[in-house]
Image (cartoon, helix red, strand yellow):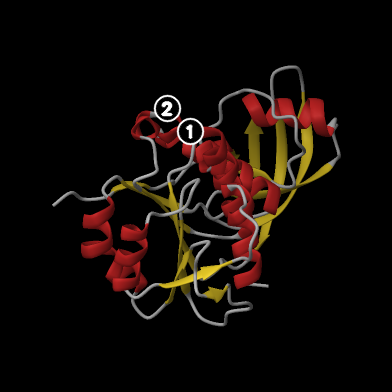
Amino acid sequence: MDSPRKVVFFLPVFSGRPVSTLMNLLLLTPDDFVSEDQVRLTGRRFKHIRHVHRATIGDRLRVGVANGLMGEGIITDANANFLTMQVTLTEIPPPALPLTVLLALPRPKMLKRSLQHLTSLGVKTIVLINSYRVEKSFWQSPWLRPEVIEAQCILGLEQARDTVMPTVLLEKRFKPFVEDRLPAMASNKTALVAHPAGANLCPRRLNTSAVIAIGPEGGFIPYEVKKLEEAGFQAIHLGTRILRVETVVTALVSKLYD
């Protein structure tokens, strides 16, 4: 029986490439600390602060430690190669959504956006699953490398002012996953599968934990919907419009949890 490949993130990896969008939170790692309350930054984050924020000595920025507390950082020194900040960390990150998302592996560009959106929305368990309509080549994509997935999740955390990394699981075989591992994952949760021909409209403002399966472009095939229904999933839809994967991701999460 195949075991799922698990991508667990502890410390973020930064590529050193400037990012054009504005960070709403500067995500730190324990390795950044040179003392109990002082950090030194180089690379991607340093370039972003310098060229996008255009921050100087004395400026204050929102900061947080990966998988830890958030707070404020004051720039105390800066030169052409690095900057130092004094940080105060007293705030807990925002609460996670009680939602597990099963996402049929989308094409790489959609995967990038979907991971960012789900992370920004507070989803902490994301399972990338196989489906008949998922192209086999997608599973060999460099976008599935742990450090690449991690980088997209970091962007989502920075956008949403969050510090807690999601767990991403890769499930390359649909039937063994649905039959052997999904029942435990969906136990005591509202289990839903998004399907254009679903019998019911998507529920709104859930007050329970949930797990939702989202299909590939073209949707799950009938066999896959049947297997999910046998596992206790209810087929739901968003209406008559056919939406792109990254749009469906945002729309479903927004409806399920206000």
Disc 2: which residue:
142
- Decide: is 201 above or below 167: below
* Nearer mark to the viewer, of 2 and 1: 2
Which quadrant does the C terminus fall into?
Answer: bottom right
Q: Amino acid at mark 2?
A: Pro
Q: Is residue 3 left or right of residue 122?
A: left
Residue 75 quadrant:
top right
Residue shown at 50% from the left, 74% from the top: 199
What x and y, as percent, mark residue 120?
Answer: 63, 53
Nearer-the-camera pick, 163 or 68: 163
Lower position in the chain sequence, tag 2 or tag 1? 2
- Residue 148 numbered mark, or none: 1
Q: Is residue 242 left or right of residue 82?
A: left
Nearer-the-camera pick, 226 or 19: 226
Mark 1 element type:
helix
- Decide: is 6 above or below 136: below
Nearer-the-camera pick, 32 or 204: 204
Question: Is there any visible trace of residue 36 in the rendered image?
Answer: no
Q: Is residue 73 left or right of residue 138?
A: right
Mark 2 element type:
helix
Q: Are marks 2 and 1 in contact (CB under 8 Å)?
A: yes
